[in-house]
Image (cartoon, rainbow, N blue to C red):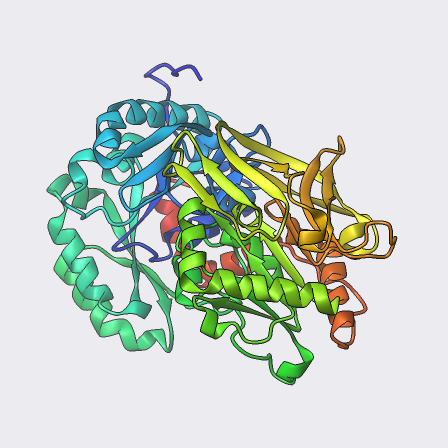
């Protein structure tokens, strides 16, 4: 990507920064993207640097943060790696894989990345100017808090980016967690005079109750800091939009995550699906379509004692599959998964599913000879005759294909994306009778290359279904017909009534719902005036 001339005039820009992480900046940015697009403006999102576990693959095979992909959808644009030029994917507490303009450039520890930061900042500036050149307005998102004074010297995502873009900053505080007013006042006190001047005002987010009760505090903070409030956004219950990270997933606060039966539906009438909460879980958004389904309870479990009696179990993706394999072995969850697999095989009911890293863990072994995650080799759960080796080249692609008869009894279309270093190969040295089944492809792309494998007790039996299977396809359950068939087969297995029609899973209605709530909660004419629109 070539640098644009310095004299290029940048469009007006709005930037959402927060007093803390998880204040709701990502969804508010998506709401502003949708609201500006509704007004006929050409708008694009931008986040200079993102640290996230949930990533997305662009149409041209680049990797970027899931939040910016959602914001692009709110703009009516395809995802573009320039919208998130630097993506950090943590592989441990002290190291991350660094993705630049959609491609991995290496795994770096903190000190290494700080030395790389000047180069990253050059990439960020070029990406922003290139993307902004064709837009009427830009919506930027910061990271964490601009007042993290230990990080300000190396900042490329908060106030430094705001200054470069000439952005008007709205500071967002999460009032649901408490301390929002102190956080706003404290943040402003730690900013420099020039940084405070760039803050146009505040948004209180995730409020429950009557906003009129806040009036005395709003007036007091506005007087103290000489900055206005642009509005109070309520907590939006049950919003079915992808999370940027697994923070809410792990805390049990993920919107739509069922912990009990919906009104009027007895637990005995519901499907119970357990999802293993891996320490390094990634792309937990693979579960969004399932947890949005009526009549399905998705339970996140962290110990074997919480297993219960599910009809299906899912082993999700991981950003460090070797470490998570050790966790499974040491926590007892590995044994629980193996017991459940044996139950599925012997009873002919239920399903055990692995997605990406989860697929790798279901196999015989996982090796990392190049140290891409942490190096070494771990024994898998031994449930599928597959061996996986991590390679330097990373598979990044959008893909469409089909689920084969071995999964649902009919061929059904599926689509999604692949993000993995691992290459899994059948292990012919593992005897089929030892696993009481034969390995067969269960999904394939348009060129008939395998996207996943499963274990069939009798491959010659045309109506046999794989009870233990895995796939590299992220987003596989987003396909309405496949998800409907998968769930209805589980219902038939356990004597539950199949659903007559597939539920549609779409982000568009939820993006519109989000935008409507934000528009009705904020002083939008004042926001537009800030931007000169």
Q: Residue at x 26, y 31 (%)?
A: 113
Question: In the rendered image of this protein, does residue 419 appear above or below residue 67?
Answer: above
Is 329 left, or right, of 73 in this rendering? Answer: left
Q: Is residue 531 visible?
A: no
The image position of residue 320, as x and y in percent, is 42, 45
- Comparing 443 with 22, the one in front is 443
Q: How many marks?
A: 0
Q: Is residue 530 visible?
A: yes
- Comparing 490 with 474, the one in front is 490
Quarter holding the N terminus is top left
Q: Residue at x 45, y 51 (%)?
A: 325
- Comparing 320 with 115, the one in front is 320
The image position of residue 431, as x and y in percent, is 68, 46
Can you tell which quarter of the image residue 166 is in? top left
Can you tell which quarter of the image residue 319 is in? top left
Quarter holding the C terminus is top left
The image position of residue 125, as x and y in percent, is 33, 25
- Comparing 148 with 360, the one in front is 360
Q: Residue at x 55, y 34 (%)?
A: 58
Q: Residue at x 45, y 57 (%)?
A: 328
The image position of residue 517, as x and y in percent, is 48, 63
């Amino acid at each position: 990507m070539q640098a644009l001339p310095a004299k290029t005039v940048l469009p007006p820009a709005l930037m959402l920064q927060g007093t803390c992480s998880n204040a709701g900046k990502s969804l508010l940015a998506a709401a502003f993207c949708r609201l500006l697009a509704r007004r006929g403006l050409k708008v694009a999102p931008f986040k200079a640097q993102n640290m996230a576990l949930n990533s997305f693959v662009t149409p041209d095979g680049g990797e970027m943060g899931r939040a910016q992909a959602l914001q692009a959808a709110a703009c009516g644009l395809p995802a573009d790696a320039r919208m998130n030029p630097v993506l950090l994917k943590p592989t441990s507490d002290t190291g991350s894989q660094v993705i630049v303009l959609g491609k991995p450039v290496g795994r770096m520890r903190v000190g290494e990345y700080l030395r790389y930061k000047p180069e990253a900042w050059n990439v960020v500036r070029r990406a922003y100017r290139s993307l902004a050149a064709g837009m009427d307005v830009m919506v930027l998102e910061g990271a964490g808090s601009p007042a993290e004074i230990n990080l300000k010297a190396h900042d490329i995502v908060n106030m430094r980016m705001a200054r470069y873009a000439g952005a008007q900053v709205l500071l967002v505080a999460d009032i649901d967690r408490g301390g929002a007013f102190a956080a706003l006042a404290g943040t402003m006190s730690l900013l420099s005079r020039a940084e405070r001047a760039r803050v146009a005002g505040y948004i209180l987010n995730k409020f429950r109750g009557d906003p009129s009760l806040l009036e005395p505090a709003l007036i007091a903070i506005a007087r103290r800091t000489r900055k206005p409030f642009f509005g109070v956004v309520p907590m939006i219950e049950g919003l079915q939009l992808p999370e940027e990270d697994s923070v809410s997933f792990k805390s049990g606060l993920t919107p739509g995550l069922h912990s009990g039966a919906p009104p009027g539906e007895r637990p005995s009438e519901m499907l119970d699906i357990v999802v293993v909460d891996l320490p390094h879980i990634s792309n937990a958004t693979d579960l969004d379509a399932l947890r949005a389904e009526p009549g399905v309870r998705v339970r996140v479990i962290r110990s074997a004692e919480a297993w219960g009696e599910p009809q299906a179990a899912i082993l999700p993706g991981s950003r460090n599959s070797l470490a998570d394999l050790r966790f499974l072995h040491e926590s007892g969850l590995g044994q629980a998964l193996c017991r459940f697999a044996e139950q599925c095989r012997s009873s002919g009911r239920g399903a055990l599913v692995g997605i990406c890293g989860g697929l790798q863990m279901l196999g015989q072994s996982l090796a990392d000879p190049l140290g891409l995650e942490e190096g070494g080799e771990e024994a898998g759960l031994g449930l599928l005759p597959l061996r996986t080796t991590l390679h330097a080249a990373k598979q990044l692609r959008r893909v469409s294909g089909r689920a084969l008869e071995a999964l649902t009894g009919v061929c059904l279309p599926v689509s999604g994306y692949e993000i993995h270093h691992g290459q899994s190969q059948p292990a012919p040295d593992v005897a089929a009778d030892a696993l009481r089944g034969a390995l067969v492809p269960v999904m394939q792309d348009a060129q008939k290359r395998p996207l996943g494998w499963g274990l069939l007790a009798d491959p010659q039996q045309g109506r046999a279904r794989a009870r233990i299977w895995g796939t590299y396809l992220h987003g596989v359950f987003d396909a309405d017909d496949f998800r409907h068939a998968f769930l209805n087969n589980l219902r038939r297995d356990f004597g539950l009534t199949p659903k007559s029609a597939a539920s549609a899973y779409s982000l568009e209605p939820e993006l519109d719902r989000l935008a409507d709530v934000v528009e009705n909660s904020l002083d939008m004419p004042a926001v537009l005036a800030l931007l000169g629109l």
